[in-house]
Amino acid sequence: MMADAQLGVAKIGVTKIGMTRIGMGIDIGGSGIKGAPVDLETGQLTRDRIKIATPSPSTPEAVAEVVRLVADGFDELPPSAPVGVTIPGVVQHGVVRTAANIDKQWIGFDAQSLFTTAIGRPCFLVNDADAAGVAEARFGAAEGQRGLVVVTTLGTGIGTALIYNGSLIPNAELGHIEVDGFDAETKAAASAREREGLTYPQWAKRLQRYFTALEDLLWPDLFVVGGGVSRKSEKFLPLLKLRTPIVPAATRNGAGIAGAAVLAAEPTTAPW
Ligand code: BGC
């Protein structure tokens, strides 16, 4: 009976456990590879995340093996469950195009096929910041926001997602704009604050320069700031003087997982 019901929904490409549509998201980060099943209606993780340290060096083969281990931890999910995987680089048609903070072997690599083979399920590959941006637009601080939202992820690098009227414009690499003669993420990412031992007010001065440059280029309606450091947003967001409203992310460290699963569940003709 159960098998018949699952077969039925598999035909229309939707996976249900009970009444809930479930997918899986796997988020590849600089320090950890994290995955969980995701309720596609609410963006909530339906089980505790599995997190395994990112191998070093983070070559495609080594990372694929860890992605397989994470996915195997959720083997109760039916074969039709959509699976989204994030990577911290530009993704076009499943191929990774840049690798600012991961092993350079990824450049030109068809990582979508690699993960599909490793997991034994069709995977959808998406840029990490784009996945987090989609989660914020659907379930978080930018839910229902019209106009242009720029979701920034401050971590090892600076990831950015452009969301216009709720739709993602993929692969915006605005963490690499030049500010005061530097690639912005090398000075304003959360990792730069840690590396240089900056106080929050010192770091906020750099964020001020960065977000001013972004708002002068794009005139967004809202900035959303994610990444682990957004948990401490009260230490730096109130110091910024911008014309654009700026708020912390609401989905926190499940954002990449949730956004990847949601995108994987939606048939698309978009070029990423
Ligand atoms: C990469 C982006 C990525 C961001 C956050 C940047 O260095 O170029 O693609 O989204 O880091 O990981």
Image (cartoon, rainbow, N blue to C red):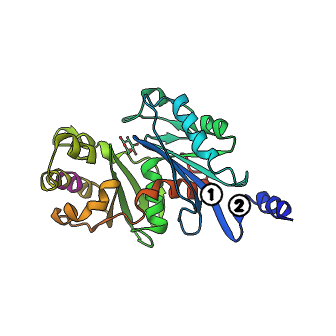
**Is residue 264 in sight in this rendering?**
yes
The numbered mark at residue 23 is 1
Quadrant hosting residue 104:
top left
Q: Which residue is mark 2?
A: 15
Instruction: Name the secondary structure under disc 2.
Output: loop
Cα distance between the residues tagged 2 and 1: 7 Å
Q: Position of residue 244 (x, y in %)?
A: 25, 66
Quarter of the render that holds ligand 1:
top left
Horizontal side of 245 relative to 52 (left or right) equals left
Horizontal side of 205 relative to 231 (left or right) equals left
Q: Residue at x 23, y 65 (%)?
A: 234
Q: Residue 53 in magenta? A: no
Q: Position of residue 20 (x, y in %)?
A: 66, 68
Instruction: Name the secondary structure under disc 1.
Output: strand
Report the amino acid beneath label 2. Thr
Q: Residue at x 53, y 58 (%)?
A: 48
Horizontal side of 146 relative to 176 (left or right) equals right
Does the Cβ of the disc 1 residue fall within 8 Å of ligand 1? no
Report the amino acid beneath label 1. Gly
Segment colored magenta? 208-213
Does the Cβ of the disc 2 residue fall within 8 Å of ligand 1? no
